[in-house]
Image (cartoon, rainbow, N blue to C red):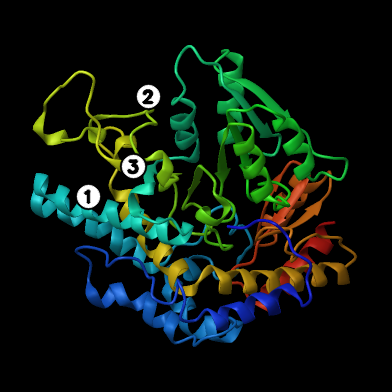
Amino acid sequence: MSAKRRPERESAPKRVARRVVQSAAGAFSHASGPPAPGGSKQAEGAIERAVAALGPGPLTEAALARHVAPLFSRALAADPARIYLANHSLGRPLDATADDVREGLDAWYARMGGAWDAWMAETTAFRSRIATLLHAPRADCVVPKTSAGQGLRAILNTFERDVVPRVVATRGEFDSLDVILREYARRGRIALTLVEPRDDGRFDTADIVGSIGGGVDLVVVSDVVFNTGQRLDDVDRIVRATHAAGGRALLDVYHSLGALPVDVLESNVDFAVGGSYKYLRGGPGACFLYLHPRHLDGSLRTLDIGWFAKRAPFAYERPDPPQLAAGGDAFLESTPPVLTAYQARAGQRLAIALNPLRIRAYSLFQQQRLVSLLAMHGIDAQGGTEDRGAFAVVTTPRATAWCERLAERGVTTDARGRHLRLCPDILTTEAEMARAAKALRDVG
């Protein structure tokens, strides 16, 4: 992912749409991920067939309603009158998700301990699909975790006990990372520097690079800031500065993966954390830690391991020191949750089939339309530009109150501090955005 912004000669949606057409035979055209083991072949291909029916080029509301919306019949029928604009928080699940989870359970009922063959195959498929979305070179670069914070702890726990690493992060990291960093700092386990936003609320790359200075061990930043929706101006520059100072860079992609193109090799980050709760529509618990291949040669070890990280876990041997598996498997922990891999399957397959380039182009178009509709009612909102993520924001001290009053009017949003977040997705219609804008005018 190259997060560096370039001057625009054409509108962002048109430019991204053009790239979609040009890359129709590229990386994502063939990549629906490896076949999900044990699944119904008919159900397995339904997502890809629906996306293929859209044809190439930009996404349109009419085509999505005809071909993709039927994949979400349960979610859409649950409360058809409600307008759901919290897609940046909890993504809406596909119908196939219930069948996928049932498949994992059925293996248990039918095979008892023999189900582990199917469960581990699905876990491998989960890793491969995330690797595809990240543009990671191999599946074992992805280590399943139950939260992004668990991934961060695994990296913090690679430092030896007599080392107090210098860590730089921003005040804009989500709570799951922020609370861990500050608790490690409180205990004297890290020396933490937190970069403040500027007066306009944005984090400036120069400030982050300035805080890195001439020496750092770990830099933790988010591709998209969770409350304001800001995309960092130049992740590549931050990574270069980190490496020049002798450190490693960890990028939180929770608010970008599945909604924006992400390329961890291009950005050259050392680590990334994220999950499927939001734009990948996989619910809670289906998260991951990415490690660059340069850290998979056995030289980097963490305290956060378990018996699944052993070179031969089912041999039950206990050499001293422990002999760990090769590559990313050395970062596995103890007996893992397995249903989360099934739970995340359908959403991952949809994101890969649609292609994040197309998703991003459509998101920018929707956000621009929503911002325009809000402006018609005298409401100032930010969104729909390349320097922002997948949701629009209305900044007001009354954000929480407005969120509650919108819920009473059948519009689901959320608020983080002074920021009311509004996120249309591929299921959101123009009519719904118009109604939501009018409702916000009424509560304001």
Q: Using the image, determine if residue 292 lies above or below residue 364.
A: above
Q: Secondary structure at mark 1?
A: helix
Q: Amino acid at mark 2?
A: Leu
The Cα–Cα distance between marks 3 and 2, rounded to whole angstroms, is 14 Å
Q: Residues within 10 Å of mark 2 (few under 14, many from 20)?
A: some
Image marks 1 and 2: residues in contact by CB distance under 8 Å: no
Q: Is residue 224 visible?
A: no
Whichever of labels 1 and 2 marks the residue nearer the N terminus, that label is 1
Q: Secondary structure at mark 2?
A: loop
Q: Where does residue 342 sit, x and y in percent of width and height?
A: 31, 56
Residue that sits furthest to the front in the current view: 244
* Figure quadrant of the N terminus: bottom right
* Residue to which mark 3 is pinned: 328
Which residue sits at x=46%, y=61%?
133
Q: Is residue 347 visible?
A: yes
* Residue to which mark 1 is pinned: 120
